[in-house]
Image (spheres, grey):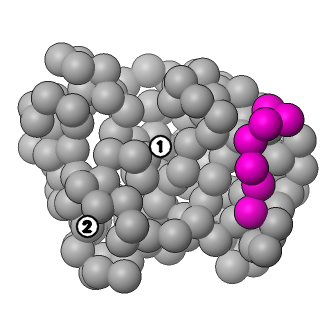
Amino acid sequence: MSEVLEGGCLCGSVRYRVTTLPMMVGNCYCIDCRRSSGTSHCTHALVPDAAFFVTGEIRIHDRAADSGAMVSRGFCPECGSAILSRNAGMPGMTFLRVSSLDNPDEVEPQMTVYASRAPTWAPLDRSKPVFDTMPDGGPQAVVAEL
């Protein structure tokens, strides 16, 4: 895995660079991730804000998560590509959408959350930790377990 990750949106208006390895990479099958991705799940790479550098405008949409914490999802306002999300319960951290990476093979999911909400046709990797919902303690607890 490279210590520098690069990515951006479909039209090229948004570009970013991450200068550290992700703290965690995971799949999420919650309803919000499904709807915001347009498919069965999202794959997120958790990185510290201090190592995340972006050029271009990102439009934010806020919505409360099941936990009540506000989740801010960032999209390119030109092409609509999903770029990132931030959870108010984890200040200083960014969840990158792995689908926005130039080379998504640079990272590999380590776990899955909200598996109980996955469509029946969605394949789950059961060789790694799978949680039916979000573990008690939220994303912080997942990171601590890895």
Q: Give the foreground label among 2 and 1.
A: 2
Q: Is residue 125 left or right of residue 52?
A: right
Count of marks, rendered view:
2
- Density class for disc 2 (Cα within 10 Å; few <14, some 14-19, many ≥20) is many
Look at the numbered disc 1 and give the secondary structure of its residue: strand
For the question of whether residue 34 can be seen, the reply is yes
Sequence-first tag of 2 and 1? 2
- Residue lying at 70% horizontally and 65% vertically, measured from the top left: 111
**Drawn side of residue 36 relative to residue 33, left or right:** left
Residue at 47% across, 43% down: 86
Q: CA–CA distance between discs 2 and 1?
A: 18 Å
The answer to whether residue 122 is magenta is yes
Q: Residue 94 colored magenta?
A: no
Is residue 140 shown left or right of residue 61? right
Give me the residue at 34% from left, 39% from top.
83
Q: Which residue is mark 1?
A: 86
Give the labeled residue for mark 2: 5
The answer to whether residue 69 is seen in the rendering is: no
Q: Position of residue 115 (x, y in %)?
A: 82, 47
User: What x and y, as percent, mark residue 30?
Assistant: 72, 35
Q: Amino acid at mark 2?
A: Leu
Q: Is residue 45 above or below residue 143?
A: above
Residue bounds of the magenta highlight: 119-125
Point out residue 87 in the picture as x, y percentages from the top left corner.
55, 43
* 72 shown above or below 63: below
Figure quadrant of residue 102: bottom left
Callout 1 amino acid: Arg
Q: Residues within 10 Å of mark 1 (few under 14, many from 20)?
A: many
Is residue 101 left or right of 94 when viewed as pictured? left
Looking at the magenta stretch, what is its main secondary structure? Answer: loop
